[in-house]
């Protein structure tokens, strides 16, 4: 297994795992046991399609690597199979503590796109959201779903990378807020200064979380845009 150093975006560390690595692991069930708890193995077995299994596993391997490195640095080393990545009913992921509750000192967000699964790990007490999307031309209806005309300056409209970056910023914020696409993406408007303006359901959730400033951090990773949103809890 190849281990890369994590990317740093703001106070977050981001780890990626290639889909190819996940495929190799799945073809050797014995080596999977080194990565997954019994419960996680059952979850993987219950996933319906090979693609969903690969994506799910790649994100978990990335998560266990970056969380494992943090725990090691804190003098609390744990084997990957003993680091439990769980999900709320909303699908928002969390690292669970010994009681199965979210460990707020290890805030994570997951994504899969293109050839990768990824995990962002925030500083203790952060809220974190991360999105990864492959840069590619998309149907105009997709643009209308995510943004009003006022957000789509000509230079953004003409660039698949700029549009993809905007999309990842919006999804990263919705993941930070724990709401996913249940609220309108057009209510998340990234600002040029790295902050974000909110409206509608996103604003309601942000207010219920104490309205702490959200900072966006962008990078490009191979053929993907990767964006992390961070705020204090
Ligand atoms: C979050 C969401 C926007 C991501 O969609 P996507 O671009 O297809 O997928 P990504 O690879 O970027 O991210 C998937 C990861 O987001 C995370 N995620 C899902 N729902 C989340 C939520 N409510 N809050 C935070 N993170 C969430 C999960 O970790 C998921 O990976 P996993 O299922 O392997 O654990 C989408 O899954 C969603 O909206 N989920 C909520 C369900 C919902 O509201 N459905 C209504 C659809 S109109």
Image: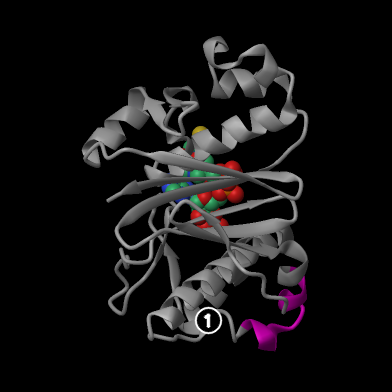
In x, y percent, where is residue 168?
A: 57, 38
Identify the image quadrant of the N terminus.
bottom right
* Main secondary structure of the magenta stretch: helix
Outermost residue, bottom direction?
30
Q: In this picture, is 153 found above or below 114?
A: above
Is 224 or 184 nearer to us in this picture? 224
**Residue range corresponding to the magenta coloring:** 23-32
Give SS at disc 1.
helix
* Residue 193 as seen in the image, left or right of residue 49: left
The CB of the residue at mark 1 lies under 8 Å from ligand 1: no
Quarter of the figure with residue 22: bottom right
Is 10 or 90 nearer to us in this picture? 10
Q: Mark 1 points at which residue?
A: 80
In x, y percent, where is residue 7?
A: 59, 59
- Is residue 215 within the magenta segment? no
Is 107 or 179 nearer to us in this picture? 107
Q: Which residue is drawn at 37% across and 39% down?
A: 214
In x, y percent, where is residue 140?
A: 70, 18
Q: Residue at x 56, y 24 (%)?
A: 146
Q: Residue at x 30, y 35 (%)?
A: 205
* Residue 84 as seen in the image, left or right of residue 221: left
* Residue 146 as seen in the image, left or right of residue 75: right
Outermost residue, front direction?
193
Q: Residue at x 47, y 51 (%)?
A: 10
- Is residue 24 within the magenta segment? yes
Q: In this picture, is 108 found above or below 228?
A: below
């Amino acid at each position: 297994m190849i281990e890369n150093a994590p990317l740093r975006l703001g106070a977050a560390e981001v780890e990626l795992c290639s889909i190819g690595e996940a495929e190799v692991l799945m073809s050797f069930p014995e080596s999977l046991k080194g990565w997954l708890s019994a419960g996680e193995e059952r979850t993987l077995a219950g996933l319906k399609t090979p693609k969903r299994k690969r994506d799910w596993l790649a994100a978990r391997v990335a998560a266990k690597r970056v969380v494992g490195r943090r725990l090691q640095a804190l003098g609390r080393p744990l084997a990957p199979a003993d680091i439990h990545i769980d999900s709320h009913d909303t699908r928002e992921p969390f690292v669970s503590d010994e009681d199965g509750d979210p460990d707020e000192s290890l805030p994570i967000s997951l994504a899969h796109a293109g050839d990768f699964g990824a995990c962002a790990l925030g500083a203790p007490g952060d809220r974190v959201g991360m999105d990864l999307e492959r840069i590619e031309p998309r149907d105009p209806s997709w643009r209308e779903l995510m943004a009003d005309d006022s957000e789509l300056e000509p230079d953004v409209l003409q660039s698949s990378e700029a549009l993809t970056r905007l999309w990842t910023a919006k999804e990263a914020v919705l993941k930070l807020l724990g709401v996913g696409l249940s609220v309108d993406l057009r209510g998340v408007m990234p600002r040029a200064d790295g902050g974000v303006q909110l409206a509608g359901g996103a604003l309601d959730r942000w207010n219920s979380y104490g309205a702490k400033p959200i900072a966006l951090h962008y990078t490009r990773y191979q053929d993907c845009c990767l964006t992390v949103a961070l705020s204090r809890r």
